[in-house]
């Protein structure tokens, strides 16, 4: 045990370490969670088993209440699980929008019955959720959404079109913002849940510049939502929908943290660009820009850690998630740009044996990363939120 370490925490670390050793299949070392892969090959038996054991333990969603499938652990203990998984090169097999956005929102706004019904399958990785927010005429100005939801006796009927619905082609359920009152804008919106496995739901995947189709147009024709699946009161969905976006931005910015620990730009640059007689990177201008990016990354990570410490384990996000989203996504984009520049011609490949898999991934990562300053609310929209909600500047826009 490290001198000065808390014995209770260290005992927990030991417990996690032994459990991971006993349960994590070594064949899966270094692999990612298959549900976040855009191509979604069918999971292997080992992947399925790993998902099952982590889900049963509640360690994929460790801070959620045990009554709903979590493990009732503190954020400190959750961090230990994360560290021990990373140490064993194991991935967290529980994830997706249910974990990142919908679950935390339902914990805050859902009824007891809704929590009991919907959270446990998320904790066990048995159900995938998608987000029905954006529409062809409602992106940044989300409150302009027109998808209608009408009372049809013992259930609701939904008609309209959503767009950019990530993972809709694989999703089991959708959390959706719908219009339930056409006479008001923000106060005419409700937050409902419906199963994607019904005849009125039609999804058409859209191809992205990075080559894959991670999101869809989603057409809704007489789609049925049960009355019990209205979250919060009728016409009060805007507040809930905005809260969910804070959780989304918080999880997007945490991607910056995860990436910061793994990528090693200086080593990459030395390998591709070469070193001078002192063993330093030969291109001094590139050296300066890499150092600057490294410093931005450290500053971002330290700020994230400080915010976490100041929150004293409270995990609720706030408007400050907009700052972290902008800082984290811009940093990742800058890093991707630098990576391609370092690789030179090798950073221009799309396919073929002339390029290594690292080079091909770098190109796709650079292209795919362009979207990170758009989804979850564009960079400009985050700047508006920061101006209004954090800096208290005058409200000159109607959006968000
Ligand atoms: C990869 C990806 C995945 C996505 N996944 C989902 C999903 O699962 N579910 C879902 O519902 N949506 C999803 N989206 C949609 C995303 O939330 C919207 O693209 C985003 O909110 C912007 O809306 P828009 O595309 O309609 O652009 P617009 O709102 O038309 O904006 C166009 C441009 O105008 C700027 N702009 C607009 N309003 C203002 C303003 N008031 N002030 C300053 N500038 C402004 C924007 O910043 C942007 O640059 C996804 C998007 C991407 C790229």
Image: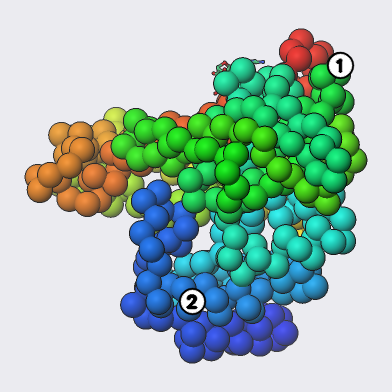
Quarter occupied by the C terminus: top right
Q: Is residue 63 above or below residue 263?
A: below
Q: Residue 67: percent from the left, percent from the top?
A: 80, 73
Q: Of marks 2 and 1, which one's residue comes earlier in the chain?
A: 2
Whether residue 31 can be seen here: yes
Query: Looking at the rendered structure, which numbered label has been put on residue 138?
Result: none
In the rendered view, does 393 fall on the left or right side of 254? right
Left or right: 243 in relation to 353: right
> Which quadrant would the N terminus be assigned to in this image?
bottom right
Q: Secondary structure at mark 1?
A: loop
The residue that disc 2 covers is 50
Q: Residue at x 48, y 78 (%)?
A: 49
Q: Quadrant of the rendered structure where residue 376 is?
A: top right
Q: Residue at x 59, y 86 (%)?
A: 14
Residue 276 point in image, percent of width and height: 17, 44
Badge 2: residue crowd in 10 Å (few <14, some 14–19, many ≥20): many
Mark 2 beta carbon near ligand 1 (under 8 Å): no
User: Disc 2 to disc 1, how far (Cα)?
Assistant: 50 Å
Q: Please count the marks in the image.
A: 2
The image quadrant in which ligand 1 is located: top right
Residue 22 screen position, x and y as percent? 49, 89
Residue, disc 1 = 183
Q: Is residue 306 visible?
A: no
Vertical comparison of 62 with 158: above or below: below
164 relative to 281, above or below: above
Seen from the viewer's position, the closer of residues 4 and 260 is 260
For image coordinates 76% across by 63% down, the residue present is 117
Q: Nearer the viewer, residue 210 or 185?
A: 185
Residue 54 position by quadrant: bottom right
């Amino acid at each position: 045990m490290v001198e000065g370490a808390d014995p209770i925490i260290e005992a927990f670390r030991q417990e996690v370490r032994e459990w991971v050793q006993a349960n994590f299949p070594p064949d899966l070392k270094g692999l990612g969670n298959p549900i976040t892969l855009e191509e979604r090959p069918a999971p292997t038996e080992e992947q399925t088993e790993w998902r099952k054991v982590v889900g049963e333990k509640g360690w994929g969603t460790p801070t959620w209440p045990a009554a709903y499938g979590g493990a009732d652990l503190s954020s400190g203990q959750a961090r230990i699980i994360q560290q021990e998984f990373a140490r064993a090169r194991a991935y967290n097999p529980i994830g997706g929008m249910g974990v990142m956005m919908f679950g935390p929102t339902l914990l805050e706004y859902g009824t007891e019955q809704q929590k009991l019904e919907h959270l446990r399958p998320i904790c066990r990785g048995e159900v995938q959720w998608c987000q029905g927010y954006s529409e062809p005429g409602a992106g940044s100005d989300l409150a302009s959404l027109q998808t209608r939801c009408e009372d049809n006796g013992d259930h609701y009927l939904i008609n309209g079109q959503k767009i950019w619905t990530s993972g809709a082609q694989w999703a089991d359920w959708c959390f959706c913002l719908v219009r339930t009152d056409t006479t008001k804008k923000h106060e005419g919106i409700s937050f409902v849940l419906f199963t994607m496995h019904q005849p009125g739901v039609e999804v058409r995947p859209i191809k992205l510049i990075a080559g894959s189709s991670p999101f869809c147009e989603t057409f809704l024709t007489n789609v049925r939502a049960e009355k019990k699946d209205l979250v919060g009161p009728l016409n009060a969905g805007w507040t809930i929908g905005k809260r969910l976006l804070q959780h989304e931005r918080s999880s997007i910015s945490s991607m910056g943290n995860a990436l910061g620990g793994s990528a090693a730009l200086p080593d990459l640059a030395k390998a591709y660009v070469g070193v001078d007689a002192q063993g330093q990177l030969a291109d001094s201008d590139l050296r300066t820009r890499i150092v600057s990016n490294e410093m931005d990354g450290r500053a971002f990570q330290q700020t994230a850690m400080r915010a976490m410490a100041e929150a004293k384990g409270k995990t609720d996000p706030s408007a400050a998630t907009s700052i972290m989203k902008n800082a984290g996504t811009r940093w990742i984009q800058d890093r991707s740009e630098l990576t391609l520049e370092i690789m030179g011609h090798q950073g221009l490949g799309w396919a073929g044996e002339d390029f290594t898999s690292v080079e091909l991934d770098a190109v796709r990562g650079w292209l795919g990363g362009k979207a990170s300053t758009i989804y979850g609310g564009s960079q400009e929209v985050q700047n508006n939120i920061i101006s209004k909600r954090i800096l208290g500047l005058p409200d000159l826009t109607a959006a968000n």
